[in-house]
Image (spheres, helix red, strand yellow):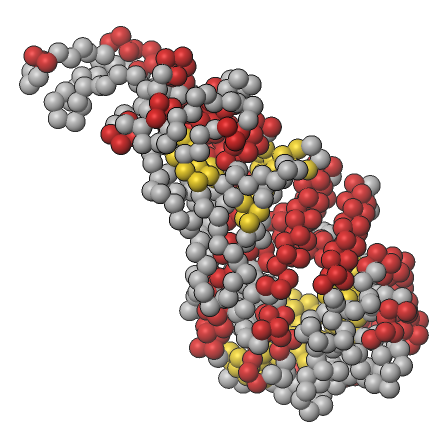
Amino acid sequence: MDHIKPLNQRAKVIERQSLKQQAGSEEQSGDVRAMQQLPLGCTLSFNPGWEAGANGLVTGLCHPMEADLYGCYDNCSWPAQVPDQITNFLDWNEKDGTVGSDWRKLDLIFPEDKGK
Amino acid sequence: MELPTRIDPSNHTGLVQISTTKARSSPARSDTQRVEIQSSKAPAKPGEIRLAEIRPFAFGGKHYVFVIPVTGIFEISELAAEIIGLFLTGVARDGEPVYTAATVESRSLVAHEVVGALRPRYTIHSIVQGLSELHVLGVLLTEDGSQPVQTVPSLPKLSAKPFPQRSLVLNVANDCNLGCTYCFASQGDYGAPKRFMSQETARESVDFLLQNSGDHPTVTLVFFGGEPLMNFRLISDTVAYATQAGERIGKRVDFSMTTNATYLTPEIIHFLRDHRVGVAVSIDGPKKFHDLRRTYKNGMGSYDMIQPRVMNLLREHKTRPVAARVTLTHGVTAVSEIFDHLTEMGFDEVGFAPVTSSDDDDYALTPEEFWQVLEEFEKLTAKYVGGVSSGERPRFSNLTNLLADLHQGVIKAYPCGAGLGLLGVGSTGKLYLCHRFLESDEHQIGTLATGVDRAKQAEFMALTHLSAKPPCQVCWVRNICSGGCHHEGYKRYGTLGHATIHRCEWIRSWINMGLHAYVEIMEKSPAFLERLERGDE
């Protein structure tokens, strides 16, 4: 941790505990980890109310104009919609080992593929 | 809502305020009224981040954060402090956050806003990392309101299981030869008939303590009064009996005693030394202060009587630290002077306690005097920190105790062990919540013969649990103070389970002082805190 350092015994317990939790569930890089722990304004499950910008308008949008500048750099993981993996295209990404390095292997999905 | 035309990163208040956390309710209102803990605000929207219950502070050019629900103390980077700063709404002119109702006023933001405000000066990567780390360690919360790390339950639940006894305070003599005007025991007899504890009752107490001590390898027997040395024969018999009884079942019995020192003969001092009896002497400083209220019943001061005896004790008794216990009263607030006097005499520790009083008592500290005491504490604290870094053994025991609590990160559901692991035994064998409630029928909680009245104990526990004290729920020191001394609250408000709210500001200031001392010692001499951890100090 670069920005917060536990001083007293209780704080050390909290740090140990949280590191253990992280180690158990993740092996990704620091950036991706940050993404998972913090909602950073971009989400895969779209919330219409939020998209419509109930508060803050453009700055609160899923893809505000600022995203063009730095959104895909590290605070937005997937700028486009992905195929429906729940019912229709269960295996669309089966050739992909790690999205980071093997993203080229992701299948392209066309409407006529449906039900294939 | 008006659109922000631009976000000015150099001015935090220029940020779009997305949703404001309303000011928390005042803690000072009637205690029958529930204090609302959750601020009323619009439902959280996705991506909303807010501050946990924290107290950020800066000291010696560094930034820190005290996480209130878990008593965690963290040092944070400049960037992390700036991130937290964005969430604070009440910022006074001097830059210190405004603490309403003892906790901090804040609002919620989404990550974009934080990134936007800090971006020109920090990389996005580092801002996100800062946010992430603050979140992982529970300083920032996300919309579901959960703490990411749950290491401690909010408060221990009431347990039906009997509490193992650790300490008994024996009222071995319900009488005193002095007549100190401020005595909470009404000049030594608690308003009950004067009598000595019998040998039989004392031995029963020992048996009771050992039988009910559960797995504790060590138990403590405290000789109290009145003036315990008026019944020295009983003390010497009980020490021998308890040592043997403990040895038979493989437990160690520790002894301690609080005395006014008037009866300290060389023989008694040798006895205390040989049996490692910890001694606390009630002494209020130099003669001019001590004799103001620590007098014989005819009004004559007791300083000249005790001074040679105390010197003898300090010279001879080296097997346990000898402590001075100072009661601060009207006119007796020169803490530094008193401290210097007592440490020069040779006391290993000096502890101060503002007298328990009602406002109309002539010995009560005035509000101004209370704050004077705190200023004096500040001087001693500065000396303490300086002394620690040059390897001196600190003797200001109030601060040592506070530092130990802070270092451990205590979460106290009860302010002390009274009625739980610690009980007072009256001179006739009745059990009371603690020594301060001795001989008070209302606060009896069983007898040696019949044991602890578990129903009464459960009632006491429910009544005095931290969660039952409304004003405490919004206070940042609640887990350390836990509402204050039961007796102090009882004396002031006439009922158990009432937080000592007349002292809140004072206690918060004192703990704040301790927090600053803590981070300074952590910076300069962390080895001291390790020794504190091991109990060497």
Image quadrant assignment for residue A82: top left
* Farthest residue, direction front: B2
Residue at 55% in and 61% down: B28
Of residues B267 and B231, the one nearer the viewer is B231
Q: Quadrant of the N terminus of chain B?
A: top left
In the rendering, at what x and y percent does residue A10 appear? 55, 45
Of residues B223 and B21, the one nearer the viewer is B21
Residue at 69% in and 72% down: B359
In the rendering, at what x and y percent does residue B444 appear? 55, 81
* Farthest residue, direction top: A104
Q: From the viewer's perspective, is residue B50 above or below residue A27?
A: below
Image quadrant assignment for residue B48: top left
Q: From the viewer's perspective, is residue B53 above or below residue B118?
A: below
Left or right? Give the position of B511 relative to B420.
right
Q: Is residue A10 visible?
A: no
User: Total label count?
Assistant: 0
Q: From the viewer's perspective, is residue B477 above or below residue B202?
A: above
In the rendering, at what x and y percent does residue A78 appear? 30, 18
Left or right? Give the position of B204 relative to B223.
left
* Farthest residue, direction bottom: B193
Of residues B2 and B130, the one nearer the viewer is B2
In the rendering, at what x and y percent does residue B368 appear? 75, 61
Residue at 24% in and 9% down: A105
Residue at 54% in and 52% down: B101
Q: Is residue B354 visible?
A: yes
